[in-house]
């Protein structure tokens, strides 16, 4: 494993950049959240005893987004994943600021997933929404292959018992 990392130093640099961004931005975002009043206050439904700042997803988003821009090939799939992450982060930030009802959050999550699905070359995306049964069948076949591989029936490297 260490040799693989040595051969692909961009993975190490990307991880270090991601960790640095998150470590630096988390306190800044927490301070901004406190200034804006975007905090969880203790009450009967909460476990926290002190106010806890929200908006932490913003720091995590930039911890993924910046290294992705720096080190990944910006293919259609990568752009779709980053755009979906941006949509999900935006929904989370809006929820932190003003609170969304369950169906509004769900709608945002579906929009984020649809963004990813539209850009990525998955069986579901290639077949289109009008061919859901065949995509679901393909997904079931893939699931069955994964289960068989995990059990060792399709893995030539795994020893039979």
Image (tube, helix red, strand yellow):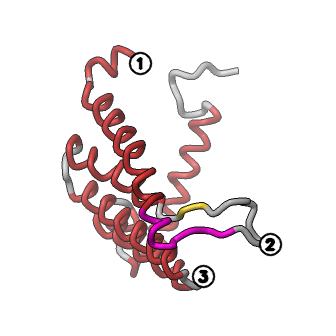
Which disc number belongs to residue 102? 3
Q: Is residue 122 left or right of residue 139?
A: left
Tag in front: 1 or 3 = 3
Find disc 1 in the rendering and name its residue.
1
Q: Residue furthest front?
A: 35
Which disc number belongs to residue 116? none
| Element type at mark 1 | loop
Query: In which quadrant will I find the N terminus?
Result: top left
Q: Position of residue 157 (x, y in %)?
A: 51, 21
Q: Position of residue 117 (x, y in %)?
A: 36, 67
Where residue 24 sits, quadrant-wise, is: top left
Where residue 18 sits, quadrant-wise, is: top left
| Element type at mark 3 | helix
Find disc 2 in the rendering and name its residue.
44
Where residue 84 sits, quadrant-wise, is: bottom left
Q: What residue span does the magenta drawing correspond to?
A: 32-41
Residue at x 62% of width, y 68% of height: 40
Residue at x 61% of width, y 30% of height: 152
């Amino acid at each position: 494993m260490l040799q693989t990392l040595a051969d692909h130093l961009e993975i190490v640099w990307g991880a270090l950049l991601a960790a640095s961004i998150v470590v630096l931005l988390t306190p800044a975002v927490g301070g901004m959240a406190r200034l804006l009043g975007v905090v969880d206050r203790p009450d009967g439904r909460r476990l926290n005893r002190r106010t806890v700042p929200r908006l932490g997803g913003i720091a995590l988003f930039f911890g993924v987004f910046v290294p992705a821009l720096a080190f990944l090939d910006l293919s259609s799939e990568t752009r779709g994943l980053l755009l979906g992450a941006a949509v999900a982060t935006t929904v989370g930030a809006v929820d932190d600021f003003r609170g969304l009802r369950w169906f509004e959050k769900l709608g945002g999550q579906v929009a984020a997933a649809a963004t990813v699905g539209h850009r990525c070359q998955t069986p579901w995306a290639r077949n289109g929404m009008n061919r859901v049964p065949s995509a679901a069948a393909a997904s079931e076949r893939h699931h069955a292959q994964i289960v068989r591989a995990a059990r060792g029936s399709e893995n030539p490297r795994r020893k039979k018992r």
